[in-house]
Image: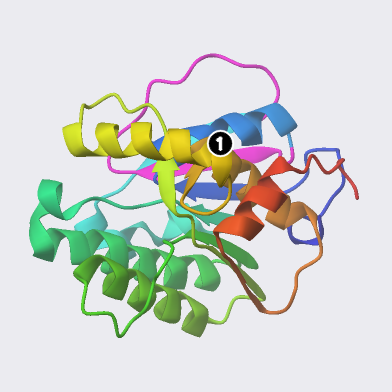
Amino acid sequence: MAAAGGGGSGAGSCFVLGASGATGQALLRELRARGLFARVTLIGRRRLSLAEESGTAVEQVVVDFERLREHAAAFRGHDVGFCCLGTTRSKAGADGFVRVDRDYVAQAAELARAGGCKHFVLQSSQGANEHSRFLYLRVKGEVEKLVQAVGFDRCTILRPAVLLCARQEFRPMEWLTQRVLGAVAWLFPTAYSVPVETVARAMVASVLQPGGGKVEVLENKAIHQLGKAEPQLGT
């Protein structure tokens, strides 16, 4: 785990953006269970209610994303940054979606790099393409390009397909899609969907294993493969 500067001793520090979402919650559980970092910092717009656990110290920093540069201190001193930040067009509107999924993420990446972060791990989307005629895929492609341009020593981009998860809020169409794809997954387990727990494990595993270059893009099949692996600390 070169980026975190240690083996199984829980050395180094990381931050998580988007810890309140389904993937972010799974990622936090994985980080706490593995104890890879001595300190995990959650950066978000509100504090989260977390269960008491021994081991990894979890700190929370509340920021105003509209004035993110005033919170540069929150991004200093971390070895690795994990980003699961995102919203939906239906929830935030088109402009709000672009602001959250592209602008906030890009600004956070810049602050993280300036603060000493070496490895940035970004959750994007299958089909991300800055030239797409679809807003969602275009914005995901644009933010990928912006994050890569920041110049991290290492940048890992995950492009999961439809995320399978249990949300607190009920989204009828998403619920139906997940049920259909959950059945399809029995026949084609890596093609159309991926559980958020698998994405979270893949994000953590990407830190543990040697990088495949300065920028590494993991498509859905690779996420499944990496997310199934259980690499031992220090390997």
Residue tagged by mark 1? 186
The residue sitting at the front extreme is: 187
Q: Is residue 51 magenta?
A: yes
Q: Is 159 in front, or is 20?
A: 159
Q: Position of residue 173 (x, y in %)?
A: 20, 38
Residue at left offset 73%, top offset 33%: 35
Q: Is residue 153 left or right of residue 98?
A: right
Q: Position of residue 191 (x, y in %)?
A: 52, 54
Q: Which residues are magenta?
A: 36-56
Say whether residue 79 is visible. Answer: no
Q: Secondary structure at mark 1?
A: helix
Q: Is residue 149 left or right of residue 227?
A: left
Residue at left offset 44%, top offset 73%: 110
Say whether residue 102 is visible. Answer: yes
Place residue 118 in its image quadrant: bottom right
Q: Main secondary structure of the magenta part?
A: loop
Q: Position of residue 94 (x, y in %)?
A: 11, 63
Q: Is residue 85 magenta?
A: no
Q: Quadrant of the N terminus?
A: bottom right
Residue at left offset 36%, top offset 36%: 180
Q: Is 152 in front, or is 219?
A: 219
Q: Is residue 34 left or right of residue 27?
A: right
Q: Position of residue 74 (x, y in %)?
A: 45, 52
Residue at left offset 25%, top offset 56%: 65
What amino acid is at disc 1? Trp
